[in-house]
Image (tube, rainbow, N blue to C red):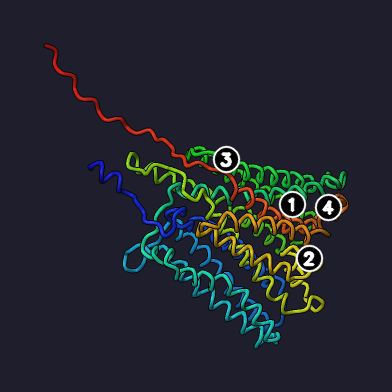
Amino acid sequence: MSDETKQTQGAVSLVDPGVPADQGLSALGLLMQLGGSLFAAIATLATFTILITGGGRGGDKALILLVLGASITRSIFHRAAGTELLYGARSFDKTAAPLAGVKRYILVGLAQSALVFLVLVAKFHVPTKLGLAIGAGFVAWPLTLAILLQLPRFKRFAMEMPVAEDKGFESASILMAVLGTCGLLGTSAVLIVMLDGGGRMMQGPGVLILLATILLVIRSGLHVQAGLSGLRQTSVDRSVELANRYANFGIISAFCAGGSLLLLMMALMRGRFDPTGLIMVVGLCWMLMAWPLIIRRFFSDRQFADLMAGDQANVHRRAPDAGLTGLGWLLFAHAIMSAALLVPQLIVPPGSMSRGMGEAMMMLGSAGTRSLWWSAGLIALQAWAGMELVRMSSTHRIVGTVYAIVAIIISVYLTWPVLQAMKHIGRMGPSAVTMFIPMAIQLVIPIATLLLVNRNVAPTAQARFRTPPAAPPAPPAQ
């Protein structure tokens, strides 16, 4: 192979300067895998709970199970779409079609959204305006993906998906650092409450619950460490090692947490068999194991591909975006999900909301104490900043910085009552501490954005050991 061929091999034409070869779709694939797994677990838990407890009348129960079944199907297609973005797929004509899974998910998502609207309006007599708002929330993400796929930057990948210059590791590291920080704050708050309980937590199964919570805190710490290491280092082997260490410990901690919860429920049941407790344990293990398994496969698969390629593997180098497109997809996806929860709240007055709607408001962090239009403006700004980072436009740093500063100020304003309550966190019950998890997400994301978009990174390359060419035979002695 000539030197000219070696230099041109693997060249990728970019739509915009500063973007990775895959336009950051590897990060989108990871997020879709995570979202699909969590939504499938929640819908499955609800389905089995209804089947066992027998809630609802015959006809209503059948329709509820139909909607939940459609939701589980949608979540499975959601995860499959993310998997195909990362690892490819084979279409019926034997050609690679990495976006085919996303297109299937769009169709399934639109169908499930229409079903939800029809069941709410026709059967449960929900006001049409509210039914449309809820249906719009369900249709928001698949409709957004359908629009994005029509853009030239993504449409060009209909038949083949290139691998980013850094294999997508830096984008994945950003996701791990941000999500791990959210988990670390949430689990630490729970641990503080449990330790403040003193002797009450040192009796019976409470000790196991306390130990499981400590394991979850350690797991989150390893999560953050692996993410930060991936941002600081250019060694693929080191990134894979730390990611696998987090994944292995994450799986162990998931089983420990599930086992502790199972023992606690058995003690509370006092000999009575209640299958709903077992369902909760299985669902908890499912959700806790989802992200570690996704991360382990992602890092190991791409490292294994390099090992199999041997000397022909492309040299690992920092992507031109330094992983910021992954942050952009996180911002954009979180904004769409928040908008899906917010739209029904803007339609229905807070005083007439159901309990489930009130919990959805807590997911946004406002907790019903501030005007929802503050959240609406913040969501719009976050979506804009996310798309600027995905595009890596010339103004992405300015827009990202403006979003981060404004979001921090507004988030503190929206969550101020919760922040004041943290002074008395020791006297709160474990259920009340759950309000700190959405608050942590609402504060961590803009702070991380401010730090990441303004960090100074220098393009670096990783040297690989190549097999030296065989030395020419020595001339015979005269």
Could you tell me how far apart the alpha carbons at marks 2 and 1 are, in whole angstroms? Answer: 33 Å
> Would you place residue 33 above or below residue 169 in this image?
below
Which percent across, then down, holds residue 297?
49, 50
Residue 367 is labelled as 2
Residue bearing the label numbered 1: 263
Q: Residue at x 64, y 71 (%)?
A: 340
Dot 4 and dot 2 residues touching (CB under 8 Å)? no
Assign a secondary structure to mark 2.
loop
> Would you place residue 474 above or below residue 414 in this image?
above
Dot 2 and dot 3 residues touching (CB under 8 Å)? no
Circle nearer the N terminus (1, 3): 3
Which percent across, then down, holds residue 150?
44, 71
Assign a secondary structure to mark 3.
helix
Which percent across, then down, holds residue 100?
42, 67
Could you tell me how far apart the alpha carbons at marks 1 and 3 are, in whole angstroms? Answer: 36 Å
In-image side of 300 versus 9 (left or right): right
Say few, some or many: other residues with alpha carbon within 10 Å of mark 2 (under 14 / 14 to 19 / 20 or more): many
Q: Which of 170/454 is in front?
A: 454
Q: Residue at x 66, y 82 (%)?
A: 131
Circle nearer the N terminus (2, 1): 1
Residue 229 is labelled as 3
Could you tell me how far apart the alpha carbons at marks 2 and 3 are, in whole angstroms? Answer: 35 Å
- Three-letter code, disc 2: Ala
Nearer the camera: disc 1 or disc 3: 3
Circle nearer the N terminus (1, 4): 1
Could you tell me how far apart the alpha carbons at marks 4 and 3 are, in whole angstroms? Answer: 31 Å
Assign a secondary structure to mark 1.
helix
- Three-letter code, disc 1: Leu
Residue 422 is labelled as 4
Circle nearer the N terminus (4, 3): 3
Dot 4 and dot 3 residues touching (CB under 8 Å)? no
Which quadrant is the N terminus positioned in? top left
